[in-house]
Amino acid sequence: MAFKIYPFVMCGGAGTRLWPMSTKAQPKQFHKIVSDLSMLQETAIRGGMAEGVNIAAPSFVCSSAHKDLVVTQCEDIGITPHMVILEPLAKNTAAVAATIGLAMADAEPDALVLLLPADHYIGDVPAFWNYIQSGGTSALAGNIVTFGIHPTHPETGYGYIKAGEPSGDESRAIAEFVEKPDLETAKDYLADGSYFWNAGIFLFKPSVITAAFAELASDILEDARHAISESKTVDNLIFLDGVCFDKCRSESFDYAIMEKASNISLIGPVDIGWNDIGSWRAVWEHEMNMGGPAVTDGYCAETKTSKVDCENVLLRSSGPFVATVGVSNLAVIATGDSVLVIGLDSAQHVKKVVTQLKDAKADHLV
């Protein structure tokens, strides 16, 4: 079945688990982490790598403070966005989805919106688009489709989706959304085989998503509607009204819609070489898989680092030269004004440092 997909890239995240590289002024999606392109650019070019799929130019939802970063990074790779929705302040992903649904409802109510994060790595792009196409029939039929990543290890840093029965159109029912588990529970999920990682990727018609918000989170929909009606548009830039958008309740899309709606379906297990690059351990795992500078001892000009007799060590520096000798299971990340030294097994806890700095009013460091 022929359909057109409009990718909308969410790039409003703070990326605090990748501090000190990721900061409020330039979060992780605008950094070059896995290649010579930023994570946002990696995401933006995927549409041009699709074969046999009708993909519109990507759109973006980002903080108004990052407008120039989005526009410039797109220009650098020759992409003109379909639209850029600029948030005056962050209000979580439910407000993002509602705003996108409303922005697309008049012009393309029955096209398909692909909502996806700006900062995830996908190794097998052709397979990614094959899975997206697999969800098209269910999305066109009026379902909100999400994509469950096949887990490769018992991960405690991701939420999970428990798959239900097949639906007859390449999709499956969803039995349950579950929060980030402890290690023993994650091992049970992996052994069970019906639990998949929740990647936060969604496919839906604008008319379907606005109807879901009208039923389940009408206050978010109406506040987003007011923010759009009072917005200013310059070319492809939509500046949401700050007073109206400030009233919008902050809620995740999963909580507001996906865990309550009856018309949801799942494509999974999805095998696309996915990594959320959400922590320094995830960066280390990616480099191990790709044979990058995390693997061997020695001097690395690319990362301004050197390792001697080290095992499972990630080093990155955009500031001083960094060297480690005889250590293991460690990450050292240096910038011009900060240095992080952390055990790879504790990589999920970097947020605690950021919280301490904010509490101490050391805003220049975050």
Image: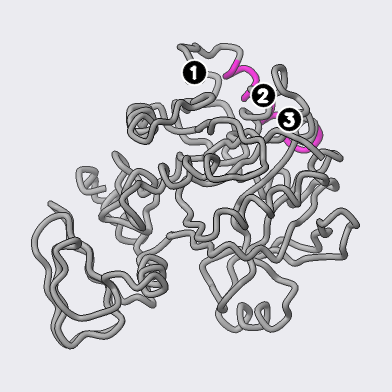
Of marks 3 and 2, which one's residue comes earlier in the chain? 2
Residues shaded magenta: 215-228
Image spot of residue 196 (x, y percent): 67, 67
Q: What scheme was used to colour the molecule?
A: one colour
Taking the magenta stretch, the answer to whether it contains residue 223 is yes
In the structure shown, which secondary structural element does the residue marked by tag 2 occupy? Answer: helix
Residue type indicated by callout 2: Met
Q: Main secondary structure of the magenta part?
A: helix
Residue matched to label 1: 236
What residue sits 84% from the left and 46% below the top?
A: 263
- The reply to whether the C-beta atoms of the residues labelled 3 and 1 are less than 8 Å apart is no
Which label was assigned to residue 104? 2
Amino acid bearing label 1 = Asn
Mark nearer the N terminus (1 vs 2): 2
Q: Residue furthest left?
A: 320
Which of the 4 image quadrants contains residue 56?
top right
Please state the horizontal and vertical placement of residue 135, each as a whole percent of the image: 75, 49
Q: Quadrant of the N terminus?
A: top right
* Label 3, label 1: how far apart the Cα atoms are: 19 Å
Q: Is the C-beta separation of discs 3 and 2 under 8 Å?
A: yes
Q: Which mark is residue 111?
A: 3
- Work out how far the residue at label 3 is from the one at label 2, CA to CA, in angstroms: 9 Å
Q: In terms of image quadrants, where is residue 51?
A: top right
**Circle 3 residues within 10 Å: few <14, some 14–19, many ≥20:** some
Residue at disc 1, secondary structure: loop
Q: Earlier in the sequence, mark 3 or mark 1?
A: 3
Which residue is at the front of the view, 309 or 298? Answer: 298
